[in-house]
Amino acid sequence: MKIDDLEKLKNEGPDTLPSKERRKFLKWGLAVTGVFAGGAVLSLTSAKNVQGALEGIKLKKYPYKPHYCMIIRQDRCVDCEKCKEACVKTNNVPEYGYRTTILEREIPIGPDEKQREFMPVLCNHCNHPPCVRVCPTRATYKDEKTGIVMMDYKKCIGCKTCMAACPYNARYFNEEKRAIDKCNFCFDTRLSKGEKLTACAAACPADVRIFGDLSDPESRVYKLIHEPDRVVWVLRPETGAMPNVYYTKG
Amino acid sequence: MSNNLSTGTLSEPRVATPTVNTATAFAILFTVVGLGVGVYAMIAGHHHVYACTREVPWGILISTYAFFAITSTGLCLLAAIGHLFGGTPLMHLGNRAVYLSIATILAAFSVIGLELESPWRMLIYNVISPNLTSNIWWMGTLYGMAVGAMFIEFFAIVTRQWNLALAVGIMGALAEVGANTNLGAVFATLSARPFWYGAQLPVFFLCSSFASGAAAIILFTHLAYKMRGTDFDERTFRGLQSAGKVLALTLFLLVVATAWRFIVIFTGNNEMAMIAANHLLKGKMATNFWLFEVAIGMVFPLLLLIGTQMKNVPAMSIAGAMTLVGGFIQRYDLVVAGQQVPVYYGWDDLPSYLGYIPSIGELLVVMGGIGVCLTLFLIGERVFGKVFKPAEHH
Ligand code: SF4
Ligand code: SF4
């Protein structure tokens, strides 16, 4: 779908978006243009960004098969950090680093009233990964089959350009490997062995992290993203990285 | 040709004074200690010695590399312009400029080699697994080609093969322009870092290279004559005046470019870029910015050059030294400020200024890089001193 076509879709108006979200986008300097496409998907600055976040969703063409993605039902996160523990154990992550973590903040919900909010973050396995573009030796690359952004440790010269380029702080330097390490959706440790979920998704007691194949209409991720009236957003859409980690509520 | 060459036609015994010998000894000491610390860091692990973090992965070693690399480009370009357009007085400084361009790029390579976590892998995988969309790859490859070209060029100069020197010199200069602008693009193409992102940095780097190159050739030519204890001959003096004009012009352009760079950030709507800019304008980095980058790095030298009409070599030399100091801090400010605003600003009570203070280890490696440059300069004056005399060819 071209940007023009996208703009012709019925715009259901910015009001469809919870006001808290709208404020958040505004704070980032993103004007909310509306909610497009069956009330479902996204509403950000410009048609370009909308398309960015939509790529693979509304285009009905998926660059990868399976096209792995994760949906994070953010408001359900209670910060128990079971996902972090599972990740560390499964992927042998050293204590000085992390592949996924939980951010938190307090947001005012009324005079003198505050609410704690948690947000799990990890590599977004971007469709246009800045890290992959900048890597001089193709030590980090986007897997042609799954779209997972992976590392070939032995090729990494440790220039750390990918760390500077990643909009999501998803990378750390692993001293033992003398290379950058990052989330690979547990490809080597689980998916390639037949498991269907990443360690974090499997470990989450609150079912925050929904993992699956976006190109499969039967998958949970597909159904969730295409639910009518569901608002889905991505982090830092203005960077053009086109993430495959989506956030939603409820 | 080379058969009638001997060290007698190249070397300059006059510079072998006790003062110069002591200076050389110190420069070598700086080099050995500084690079030694870097090698230790490589073996022990950078995290034990350097202050970079996950959030601020690039520090003073990247900016020092950029400083030397940018200076090298400027020297190479000034030499190429001098040699190519034989009529300009710049050609009288050209041979020394080529040599210093090699010296500064070797200093740059020393520092970046110790900044990379696993540099040996680069030798293999830059070649067998290149990524043509990577500015780092292009920068490394083009600087590699440039230094090769300059070695050949300098050899051709020493052996008086002027046509070869000219041809290879032009190739080297083109490679340097590519490498230099790619270095700018390393920062300019990162949309995740709004303070860097945008079209300006590559050409800003190129303009900076002319300024730093002119500053370096003035300063080092002045030092070279001091070391010999002789006065400037007419041709060298006119060469220095030309370099002074280049310096004044490029400083003026940099003032204008810097002003617009900040104005554009504040007319945009990117909060992260504005916060970073404010760290420099009125925050934790304001002294760096206003005193070193703006006053010492641009305004004072410009006023000095204009005030003395480029007629006074010590004044030009001081302007050159100030430009280099300011340029060094400018690269530092650019690299560090661009990473200060956390990518998840607003979460985790993250401050808007993450902080970075160079470690002693990093500063020693910087000293090592400066040592490489000074050692090569001092030894070069002795071994090739006569090669650097004003050109008689063309
Ligand atoms: S989130 Fe960062 S590391 Fe992951 S693909 Fe995107 S740019 Fe690369
Ligand atoms: S640090 Fe390693 S993976 Fe990252 S860009 Fe450099 S070589 Fe590539």
Image (cartoon, rainbow, N blue to C red):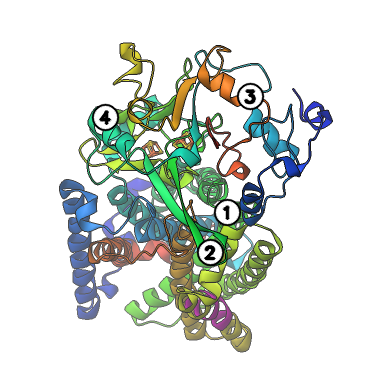
**Parent chain of label 3:** A
Q: Nearer the viewer, residue B283 or B362?
A: B283
Whether labels 2 and 1 share one chain: yes
Q: Do the residues labelled 3 and 2 touch (CB within 8 Å)?
A: no
Q: In the picture provided, is A132 more to the left or to the right than A189?
A: right
- Identify the residue position indicated by label 4 in the image: A91
Q: Which of marks 1 and 3 is in front?
A: 3
Q: Is residue B330 above or below residue A120?
A: below
What is the CA distance from the residue labelled 2 to the residue labelled 4? 35 Å
Secondary structure of residue under mark 3: loop
Same chain? Circles 4 and 1: no
Part of the protein shown in magenta: B292-301
Nearer to us of marks 3 and 2 is: 3
Tag of residue B276:
2
Give the percent coordinates (x, y) of residue A68: 48, 21
Q: How crowded is mark 4: few (under 14 residues within 10 Å), some or many (20 or more)?
A: some
Amino acid type, residue under disc 1 in the picture? Pro
Upstream in sequence: badge 2 or badge 1: 1
Chief secondary structure of the magenta span?
A: helix
Q: Mark 1 points at which residue?
A: B194
The answer, for residue B104, to whether it is visible in the render is yes
Q: How far apart are marks 4 and 1 (CA)?
A: 32 Å
Do residues under tags 1 and 3 come within 8 Å of each other at their CB atoms? Answer: no
Residue nearest the viewer, comparing A211 with B90: A211
Residue to which mark 3 is pinned: A227
In this rendering, would A160 be left or right of A56?
left
Circles 2 and 1: CB distance less than 8 Å?
A: yes
Q: What residue type is labelled 4?
A: Asn
Label 3 and label 4 in one chain: yes
Query: Could you say whether the residue bearing mark 4 is in a helix, strand or loop?
Result: helix
- Disc 3 to disc 4, how far (Cα)? 33 Å
Question: Could you say where residue B84 lies in the image, as x and y percent from the top left?
Answer: 60, 53
